[in-house]
Amino acid sequence: MNLQNIQWKIHLDEKTVGNPHDWFKVFGTWIPESPEVFVDVADYSHVTNGPVIFLSGHNECYTLDNTTGRHGLLYERRQPVEGANPEKLKASLKTTLAHAALVEGDATFKAAPKFLAGDVKFIVNNRAIAPNNDETFAAVKPELDALFSAVYGAGNYTLEREQEARQRFMVHVKTKAPVSVAEALAKLG
């Protein structure tokens, strides 16, 4: 299976989400400072259980997301990436965590958002590549286990696949003990 259209969602401590307008300003600063070709920032805060603030780019997008009633930073890789799945998984998770660290350190927020780096979702936003079924999970699980054993330590996390067949392929990864963004980034190297 050649994984493409990879998404990661790192959940936020709900007490630290902050004001959507501040997220809009922060995402706006990423446009000129990034090698990515970002197109626009959009405010969807009027949507219930959906995207809140969306930063659209040619290759990747970032969203303050509340799709499942839980806020988090959602990263989406839009364009195909060459390489083996383990490298793509590691690179995309590292990119997501690096951007979460940027958010945590941004002085725009009155109180810094705090991410729960031990509470993430891995999503493949392409049903043709990864139908949401047990076969896909069996194919991807060894690669996810290798990645998360390196980041969290073997046996210190759980993987739970979204069971609703109408949903995209999604695996919720949860650690037994809290993990900070800085700790997870350090382990990824």
Image: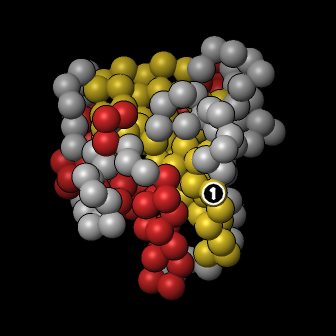
Is residue 11 in view? yes
Q: Is residue 50 above or below residue 82?
A: above
The residue depicted at 21 percent of the width and 31 percent of the height is 178
Residue indicated by mark 1: 43
Q: Is residue 104 above or below residue 106?
A: above
The residue depicted at 59 percent of the width and 20 percent of the height is 162
On the picture, is 46 further left or further right than 171? right
On the picture, is 31 further left or further right than 15? right
Residue 6 at what x, y percent from top left? Answer: 60, 49
Residue 119 at what x, y percent from top left? Answer: 36, 32
Q: Residues within 10 Å of mark 1 (few under 14, many from 20)?
A: some
Is residue 147 in view? no
Residue 21 at what x, y percent from top left? Answer: 49, 59
Colouring style: secondary structure
* Quadrant, the C terminus: bottom left
Nearest the viewer among 73 and 136 is: 73
Mark 1 lies on a secondary structure that is strand
On the picture, is 130 further left or further right than 179? right
On the picture, is 71 further left or further right than 109? right
Nearest the viewer among 43 and 158 is: 43
Please identify the residue farthest to the right as the structure is shown: 128
Q: Is residue 105 above or below residue 145?
A: below
Nearest the viewer among 169 and 109 is: 109
The residue depicted at 24 percent of the width and 21 percent of the height is 176
Residue 185 at what x, y percent from top left? Answer: 26, 54
What kind of residue is marked 1?
Answer: Asp
The residue depicted at 25 percent of the width and 52 percent of the height is 111
Please identify the residue farthest to the top as the structure is shown: 163
* Quadrant, the N terminus: top right
